[in-house]
Amino acid sequence: MTRLDPLVKLGVALVYVGYATLSQVSIELATLSLFVAFLLLAVERMPVRTFLLGLAPFLFFAVTSSWIYAVAPANVYGWTGWQVALAVGLRTVAVGLVSMLFAYTTEPADLGRALVHRLRFSRRFVFGALAAIQFLPSLAEEARLARIVARAAMPAGTSRLRLWFAGLSPALGIILLAGAIRRAGTAALAMELRGLSATSGRSAWRVPRPGPADAVFAVAALILLALLWAAIRL
Amino acid sequence: MPRKDDNVLSAEGVGVRFPRAARDAVRDVSLTLHAGERLALLGPSGSGKTTLALALLGAIPTLVPAARHGNVHWSGLGERVLATGTGIAAAVLQDTDAQLVALTVEDEIAFALESRGLSPSDIDARIEQALMRPPGLGLARRDRTLTLSGGWRQRLALASALAEAAGTLVIDEPVAHLDGDAAAEAVAAVEAACQDGAAALLIEHRIDHILHLADRVLVLGADGAPVAAGATEATLREVAARNDTLGLRLPAEIRVADALSRAGVAEGSPEALAVALATLGLDRKRSVSLGPALLEIRDASVRRGRKTVLNDVSLAAHASEVIGIAGPNGAGKSTLALLAAGGLAAASGSMRRSGGTPVYVPQNPALAFATGSLEAEAARHGLSWSEAAAAIARAGLAPDRDRHPLAFSHGERRRLAVALALAMPGQRLVTLDEPSSALDGIGLAALDADIEALRARGAAVLVIAHDLDWLSSVADRILVLEDGRSLAEGPSRHILKRAVEGRLPLRPPPAAKLAARLGWSFEP
C-alpha cells in the first residue's frame, strides 16, 4: 500500500474512520479491527513490537473512555453498561488501527506535496507541520539527555525510584520549550531563505498522482466495507 | 552563474540595530564580493558576523525584526529583497541542527530548487549530483533526516546549498560540528563551487580550516565595526602582530610566523622549533602529581536498543588528570562520557567511581541545569548561596540569585556549570562534552583557564573535542574512539604523532603538523 496515492488513501481512511465512528455494533467493529490488524501485520509486515507500541495509546484511551460506561447503571441507551463500554472501546481501537495503517503506509513528504499541489493547502502550513515533526526526536533526545545529566548529578546511594524521577521537573519543561522556540525560529528562517514564500515561478516536483491501482484500491476498500455492512445487517 | 571576477555583491556603510538595543550590532561595514572569490567574515563571538550575513542577504529586515541601514546591492536581484531562493545566493545557517525542514534527504535538497521553479527532471539530476560527491556522498535519497547525526545533518545542509548552484554561498560556521576529514571535504566542496564561479562568504571560528580557502578576510571587532580587512594571510599576520588578537583563533602557521618574526628567528634555524612549540603550547611540561583514581572503567559496553554504541572500552582517570576523548562523528565519545558520569548503565564490563558526585556539562550546556534560579541551582549542587555567588563572580558572571540559568548565553552557561563544579568541595569527575566548538579565541582562553582550575582543584577532567591540537594542549592523555571501540590511548604527544603520521582516523592537526615539519620529534 506504500505505493498508493496518499490522497486516495486519506479519503478511504476517512471513510473507514467515519464508518467506525457511526457503528454501534461491537461484532462489526471487532471484525473491522481484526481486518485492519491483519493488513498491518500480515500484508504490510509491521513488526509486532511497533504494532503494539502504536496501538498502546489507543488501547489506553479505549479502556479509560469505556470504563465510565461499564460502571454506569444498566440500560444506557437501552443497552447494558458493559455493552456500551465494549462498543466504545472497540470503536477507539478500530479508528486507531485505521489511522496506524494510513500513517504506516504513507510517506509524510508525499502527503505534504499532494496536499499543497492538488488540494491547494498553504505551503506554510504543510511545510511548517513537516518541519515541526523534525523537532520531536530532537526534543525527545534533549529530554533524555537532560534526565541522564540529572541522574548523574544524584549522590551515590540514591534509590532507584528517585533515580528514575531525576530530572522530571518544571525546569525540564522550560529547557525544552526554550529549545523548541529556538529551533522553530531557525527553521522558519531557513525555509524563508529557501524561498518558502516565493509565489511565482514555483515548480512541482514529484507530486503523487492517482493511477489505476488507486482506483482498484478505492473500489475494493469500499466494496469490503459494504460487504461488512451487509453481513452484519442482512 | 556570473562570470569570473564580476561584482556580485557590494555593500556600503551597512549597520544593523535590533529593537530596543542601545547601539548598533553591526556598524559601518562596506565590502565587495566578486564571482569566484572567497571572503571570510571573522571576529569574536557577539561581534555581529551572523547579523551582518543576514543583513546582506536581506533577511534583516524582511524576516528578522531589526533595522538595517546603508546600501546593499546584489547583482541581478532587481526589485526583490531576499537574495536567497532566487539563485543569487544560497545560505547555510549556523544552527544546522534546526534548519533541516524536510523528512528525507531528497526532499531537503529539492526544497529550494522547487521554490526556484526548476523542472522536476532538473531537480532529480541535481539531487543525484549532490549525493555523488562530498559533502553529500554517503547520504541516500530516502534517508530520514531525523535519524542523521549532527555531522551528517551539517553535511546535508551544505549539500543542499551547493545543489542550488547559486551565484554566492553564504555559510555560517561550515565546519563547526564536523570532524577533521569531514571538515576538509566540506572546505573542498566549497572550493570546487568557487572554481565554477560561485562567490563565498564564510563565517568560521576555526580559521585553520579555511585559511587556504579564503582569498580575503574582513574582521569585525567586538563592537561590530570592521577592524581589519584584506588578503587573508597578510591580514591575519597583521592581527597576530597586534597585542590584542581581536579574540580570533589564529591559525597555527600565522601564530608561529609571528612568533618567529618577533623573536628574530629564521624558520629553518635550530631555534625555530623551540619558538614554535612554545607558541603552539606543545612544549607544556606538567609536573602534576596524580591523585587517587576517581574512575575506572573496564571493558564496558553500552547498548541503545539493539545497537551496541560502546564496545569493550576501558578508561581510568585520576585526580588532577585531564583526559581527552577524540574520534570521528558518531564514535561513541558522548556515550562514554555519560557512562563515566553515571548517567548511563553499562550492559557489560565493570565501572568503579569514587570521589564526590560527578559533574557532566553537555554539549548544550542548558541541559546541565535542572532548576529555575541560580540559588536553587547552588542548593542542588550542595552549595550555600554565598559559596556559589563567589564562584559565579570569579567566573566573570553576575551572581544574581533569582536569575534563571537559561538567561545566560551559551558560553556563559558552560562557564556557570564549571564555576559551580569548581565550588563543590572534594575531588570529583568533571566531564566537558565538546566545550570548545564554536568558541572564539577569548572563549577558548577562558576554557583553558577553567580546565586548569579544575585540575588544580583535584578533579579528574574528561574533555571531548574534535580539535586535536587544542585537546592535546589541555589533556595529559587522549583516548581515541572509532565505531564505539577504543582505537588508541596514550600521552597526548603520542596520539598527536600517530595522527600526524596518518595512523589514526583523525585528520592531522595543523599545529602538530607544522611542528613536525619544523623537526619536532613529539618527545618531551
Image (spheres, coloured by chain):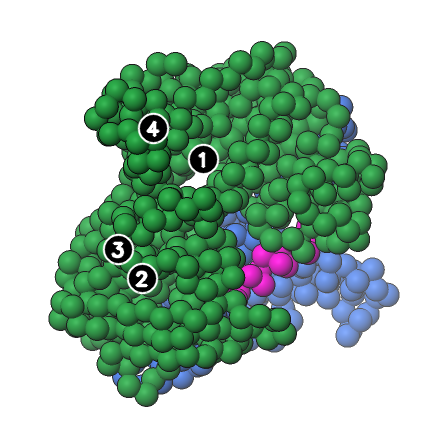
- Colour in which chain A is drawn: blue
Expressed as whole percent of the image width and height from the top left, the position of residue B4 reads: 13, 67
Circle number at residue B366: none
Please state the chain letter of the residue tagged with numbered disc 1 in the rendered image: B
Up/down of A163 relative to B59, above or below: above
Earlier residue among tags 1 and 2? 2
Point out the frontmost of discs 3 and 2: 3
User: Can residue A230 be spotted in the picture?
Assistant: no
Q: Position of residue B487 (x, y in %)?
A: 37, 22
Marks 4 and 3 share the same chain = yes
Front disc: 1 or 2: 2
Q: In the picture, one chain is green; tell me its letter.
A: B
Q: Nearer the viewer, mark 3 or mark 1?
A: 3
Q: Is residue B370 visible?
A: yes
Q: Earlier in the sequence, mark 4 or mark 3?
A: 3
Name the amino acid, label 2: Leu
Circle nearer the N terminus (3, 2): 2
Residue beneath disc 1? B465
Determine whether the residue tagged by mark 1 lies in a helix, strand or loop: loop
**Residue at the image position 74 percent from the left and 30 percent from the top:** B424
Residue B97: percent from left, percent from top: 45, 54
Magenta-tinted stretch: A170-187
The residue to which callout 3 is attached is B231
